[in-house]
Amino acid sequence: MGLTLFGYLMGRQRALVGFGGKRSSAFHSLPGYYGGYVALWCAIPALAILALWVIAEPVLIERAVIAALPDDLQVLPAQRLGLVYNDIRNLVSGNILSGEADANILAAAEHYSRLKANSRLLLSGVLFVLAFAGMLWSLARVKPALRARIHVEGVVEYLLVAASAVAILTTIGIFLSVLFEALRFFSEISPIEFLFGTEWSPQTAIREDQVGSSGAFGAIPLFAGTLLISGIAMLVAVPVGLMSAIYLSEYASGRVRSYAKPLLEILAGIPTVVYGYFAALTVGPMLRDLGESFGFVVASESALGAGLVMGIMIIPFVSSLSDDVINAVPQALRDGSYGLGATKSETIRQVVFPAALPGIVGAVLLAVSRAIGETMIVVMAAGLSANLTANPFEAVTTVTVQIVTLLVGDQEFDSAKTLAAFALGLVLFVVTLLLNVVALSVVRRYREQYE
Amino acid sequence: MNNPHPAGLKDLVARQIPRRYRAEWLFEKAGLGALVVGLGFLAFFFYTLVMNGYTAFWQSRIALDVPLTAAVIDPDGTRDVDLIGQANYQGLLRDALRTRFPEVTARGELRSLFALLSPGASFELRDRVLTDPSVIGSAVEFWAVADDDVDMLIKGHSSRDVPESDRRLSDQQLAWIDALQADGAVEKRFNRAFFTSGDSRDPELAGIWSATVGSFFMLLVTLVLSFPLGVATAIYLEEFAARSRWTDLIEVNINNLAAVPSIVFGLLGLALFINLFGMPRSAPLVGGLVLSLMTLPVIIIASRAALTAVPPSIREAALGVGASKMQMVLHHVLPLAMPGMLTGAIIGMARALGESAPLLMIGMVAFIVDTPQSPVDPATALPVQVYLWADSPERAFVERTSAAILVLLVFLLLMNAVAVILRKRFEQRF
């Protein structure tokens, strides 16, 4: 770091003072660029080596330590060996061991920490030499003819490209990480059983004779529950959101619009955990009491409560998207309709709405994908037990609830139970991705139509 | 005209007009009704939150005359801090209660008498003595933190009318509280512990400080990572990249990432950062990484909008006086677009602050009492703290949850207000 800064100053100085008897104005680029040039030569090779080192170091050390272990330990199967190695590492970092440490392990731990210290020392040496060499080499190249600006700007442009690749890497990362775990799951449970089974009880038996732990992974009840809750949410959000969008864009005066729109958007800014709290503590019991007074049995974790609150959360989403869409309908269409003698509401229903329909469908699709992926409300206000029902007064569970319950708390990564969460996550990702792609292309095509 | 009955048609239209106007009226009112439903919910929502939560900012305390006997606290008279810290302050408090109610002698009764005070009261007494050791030997009036059940009763959240078996406090305890209240020895004071302490199993001692610090570290990591990356991506896409398959691919990706459910990001964090890279669980560092991936699309989209808002004349002028393309962008366009980018970043941060689902995945739901010192210490975040408290059965936690939500909302409101002010202040019309 320091060397990089030093390199920058040196390069700049060299260009400022002039070189070989020529004045600094004879240089191709501004002095700062020569500084940058030297600094880049200092930093980039060193950083590259650092990155490689960080990746390679644990692997190499693990090999060296295991090779130095006594023979009786070396013949262990890979999994046991991994445990032993973990013990060694825990010993070094002072964590709790999985058992008593014997002399072999202690010796190995010492070996490990010695190797690690050596490697660190070597690393700093290599880095320093590399940075210094880079600096000298590039300093020697600082001449008036050197087109430093072109070089520096080229590097900066590559950095920009790299930054923009992060978005793609994230998508690939999500897909691959979820896919790999899901594939491990599907090697144990067949995808057919997972996608079409109607029994969900992910508790796998620890003992053979345990009761109630069949370990069934049929996800149909989860999909049904998700659809039920999302359906209720859409029943709330679409009419309310759409009507308020129509009112705001067609009827409301400028003043009302300027107050009501931001207020409605506040609903979108409230954290979902707050909605969840609200659904669980206020809406749930309220619905239960209401149901009791009408003689219904309403579970306090009913699909209705979660769905209602989720719908309210999505209202601003639907309304602001459809507001945009409605505003994009050309005024000429409205004027034509008025000219034929239609009233305002007739114009909206028979001219504006059909014209805006593709955009509104896109908005609703986006809202559906939002509802399917929503987690906190259902985790806090919907049930845990898988229940295949269409009755909104009963408790159902959803895909996201199951992901959370399967993954929160202690876990090991080889049981079907935790891997099932990744399979569910894969389904969730693929479904929402499809919905988004379709919705975005619908919206885009619609926009192009009127531009 | 083709129509054979023009008079009949005219008549028909005239007859339909009242019905059409009625429909018109109905439609407008339906729109208004929808708007009112949405806003009404907002009002109801805040009303419930505030009514549930505002009492948590006060905490009932019970005044006791505590004799700080030197023989108990500092028997040797050395004023050694370690020794003073280990003294039996709970015993002192209990003695004070016993002198206040001399008629209570049975063991069971004494136990329920002592239950009026919070287990944390003795620590507060200790801290008081440690900050001012000169009080040792004298009797001080000490306002001890009351137990959460007492607190709920005094705030009127739990009722006296239910039968004794359904109540958290017995008739006898109620009588003691009444006696204390008659003396003016029960008071609601500002609840400092709520803002300065970490989580606790006892509602009266639980606070949001450690969660706030956890959130802070997380947002710091998020900001440091996602802002430069987002701005760089936006600059590349807007200023340098020619429209090609590659940029189309990036655009589609960004739009989709903005709509991927947050819990999927949590799965990514779990599988990639924790499982593959072996990063520590429950650490704000991992939380920040996951949240920055989530915030990135928001910042990119806002930054691109800010860049397009800079008029081409600026660019042409810069190029005209001989700047290179990179100089044009970095020296002229970027500074002009910065306020817009910052606004986008703040809005993205506000969203990240309220996010909790992916944090559940990476283990940030632990019970954390200590305040995290660095981004790799186990920590929790404000919204996750809300989630944890909402699951707790005690009535007093309902109040705390609402109060924590209020604090969270105040933070969000502040961030959004800063964004709006920034936009207003630096808004330039070209």
Image (cartoon, coloured by chain):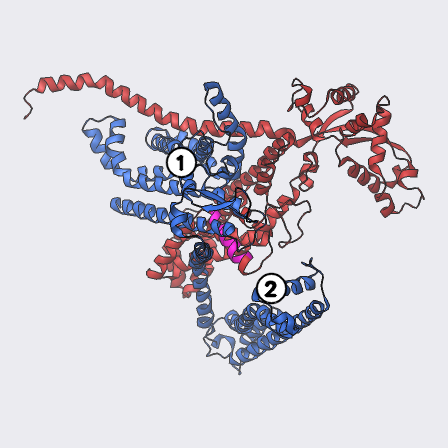
Q: Is residue A43 above or below residue B420?
A: below
- Quick check: is B135 in the magenta stretch? no
- Along the line of sight, the residue nearer the viewer: B92 or A393: A393
Which mark, residue B423? Answer: none
Residue pointed to by mark 2: A80
- Relative to A423, A102 lies left or right: right
In the rendered image, which quarter is residue A95 located in?
A: bottom right
Q: Position of residue B348 (x, y in %)?
A: 49, 47
Residue at screen point 63% across, 63% down: A86
* Secondary structure found at label 2: helix
- In terms of depth relative to the viewer, which is nearer, B280 or A246? B280
Q: Which chain is red?
A: B
Most prominent secondary structure in the magenta stretch? helix
Numbered circle sitting on residue A228: 1
**Magenta range:** B262-274
- Check the image and report above or below for A23 versus B292: below
Specify the amino acid type for callout 2.
Arg
Colour of chain A in the rendered structure image: blue
Is A46 displayed left or right of A351 in the figure? right
Q: Subunit of mark 1?
A: A
